[in-house]
């Protein structure tokens, strides 16, 4: 918004310093004059003339001296106040310059204000931390957009190639073409829905309800049981009631993604997936473990990046869209939780989602009032 120009903060501080200094001078001189009166140095005779006393000469010289002192205090206050205000506001100038650079799009600049901790340095450190988070977020969004564009372009290019083949070869098998187009179109739809789900979770635009993660785990395993049986993977679910607060749809998607990921990243035969829920004093845990190939900690730490695939999937009929664990991470963060990926010594991976716990008796106590 447009604002009219006003006095600068430095000038306001200078005038404030000068005003207080002049007030202190007036009070000091007033105290000195009151002291002279109390000592009887300002007395008159019956005719109203000044009576000579030892302090008369001192009083006669007091007024011009006091005026000179006030002039000196005025000049000294203006110059000293301007200098001190400039020194005090120098950190604010650096913060303002950094803000303008960030407004122009430069997020790599940091203030890094030296010196001991005070209000200005706390503000500068907080601003640097904000710039660091913004820079990381913008870089992640740019990388995500580039990857999403690449992933969406692939099925569109395949569809175009299939249609070009059908146009140039009228005798081509129409049924095969339709099947391949259906597969490519399904993948594009899945990818688009996954992108929308990530955006929804990042914005936090969902209604929070009381959710039991153990029920989410049971529902996800029942839904994916045919897929597990098809690939020879055994599903084992156990655990306690794990109450938390969040979106039932998003938390079910989180659990389904984890179980699905554990199935398709498993051994070709006789693989196993363990789904466990547990309760802690202030948090609830959902743990999904699976057998599989050996993973390094460095590789495991990158699996939550969008469109990142750790190993080649054994089952080519479930290629996925590369957003499974990225969606899990986004939903977890949107619910105030943490996601941990740890390679198992025997192969495979252990994935743990920790969410804030909800008192199971809170709802009943509230309804009983």
Image: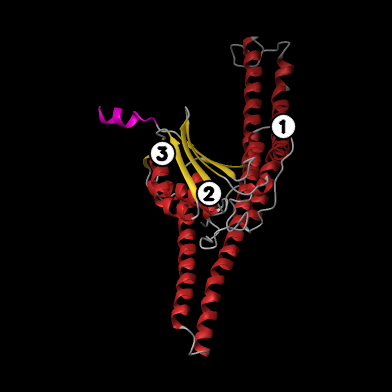
Q: Nearer the viewer, residue 6 or 102?
A: 102
* Label 2 residue SS: helix
Q: Which residue is mark 3?
A: 214
In front: label 2 or label 3: 2
Nearer-N-terminus badge (2/3): 3
Label 2 environment density (alpha carbons within 10 Å; few <14, some 14–19, many ≥20): many
The image shows residue 19 at horizontal and vertical percentages of: 62, 33
User: Rounded to the nearest whole Å, what is the CA distance between mark 2 and mark 1?
Assistant: 50 Å
Q: From where the camera sits, is residue 256 visible?
A: yes
> Is residue 367 on the magenta stretch?
yes
Magenta region, residue range: 359-368
Label 1 environment density (alpha carbons within 10 Å; few <14, some 14–19, many ≥20): few
In front: label 3 or label 1: 3
Residue positioned 42% across, 54% down in the render: 226
> Is residue 278 on the magenta stretch?
no
Q: Which residue is mark 1?
A: 116
Image disc number at residue 227: none
Q: Which residue is mark 2?
A: 262
User: Rounded to the nearest whole Å, what is the CA distance between mark 3 and mark 1?
Assistant: 50 Å
Q: Is residue 172 left or right of residue 293?
A: left
Residue positioned 70% across, 51% down in the render: 109
* Label 1 residue SS: loop
Q: Are marks 2 and 3 in contact (CB under 8 Å)?
A: no
The residue lying furthest to the top in this view is: 39
Label 3 environment density (alpha carbons within 10 Å; few <14, some 14–19, many ≥20): many
Q: Is residue 367 left or right of residue 312?
A: left
Nearer-N-terminus badge (2/1): 1
Q: Nearer the viewer, residue 10 or 136?
A: 136
Q: Is residue 271 left or right of residue 41?
A: left
The image shows residue 62 at horizontal and vertical percentages of: 71, 22
């Amino acid at each position: 918004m447009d604002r009219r120009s006003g006095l600068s903060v430095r000038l306001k501080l200078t005038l404030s310093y000068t005003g207080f200094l002049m007030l202190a001078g007036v009070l000091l001189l007033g105290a000195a004059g009151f002291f002279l009166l109390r000592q009887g140095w300002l007395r008159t005779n019956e005719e109203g003339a000044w009576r000579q006393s030892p302090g008369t000469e001192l009083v006669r010289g007091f007024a011009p001296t006091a005026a000179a002192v006030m002039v000196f205090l005025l000049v000294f206050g203006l110059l000293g106040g301007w200098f001190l205000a400039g020194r005090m506001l120098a950190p604010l100038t650096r913060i303002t310059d950094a803000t303008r650079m960030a407004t122009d799009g430069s997020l790599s600049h940091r203030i890094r204000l030296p010196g001991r901790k005070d209000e200005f340095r706390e503000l500068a450190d907080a601003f640097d931390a904000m710039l660091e988070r913004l820079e990381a977020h913008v870089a992640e969004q740019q990388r995500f957009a580039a990857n999403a564009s690449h992933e969406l372009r692939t099925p569109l290019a395949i569809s175009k190639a299939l249609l070009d083949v059908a146009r140039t070869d009228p005798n081509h098998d129409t049924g095969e073409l339709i099947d391949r187009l259906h597969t490519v179109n399904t993948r594009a739809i899945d990818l688009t829905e996954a992108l929308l789900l990530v955006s929804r979770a990042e914005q936090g635009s969902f209604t929070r309800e009381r959710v039991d993660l153990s029920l989410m785990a049971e529902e996800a395993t029942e839904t994916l049981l045919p897929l597990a049986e098809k690939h020879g993977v055994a599903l084992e679910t156990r655990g306690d009631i794990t109450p938390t607060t969040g979106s039932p749809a998003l938390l079910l998607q989180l659990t389904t993604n984890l179980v699905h990921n554990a199935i398709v990243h498993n051994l070709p035969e006789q693989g196993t997936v363990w789904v466990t829920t547990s309760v802690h004093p202030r948090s609830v845990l959902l743990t999904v473990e699976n057998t599989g190939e050996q993973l390094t900690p460095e590789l495991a730490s990158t699996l939550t990046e969008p469109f990142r695939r750790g190993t080649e999937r054994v089952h080519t009929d479930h290629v996925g869209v590369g957003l499974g664990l990225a969606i899990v991470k986004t939903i977890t963060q949107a619910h105030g939780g943490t996601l941990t990926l740890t390679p198992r010594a025997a192969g495979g991976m252990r994935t743990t989602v920790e969410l804030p716990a909800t008192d199971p008796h809170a709802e009943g106590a509230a309804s009983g009032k």
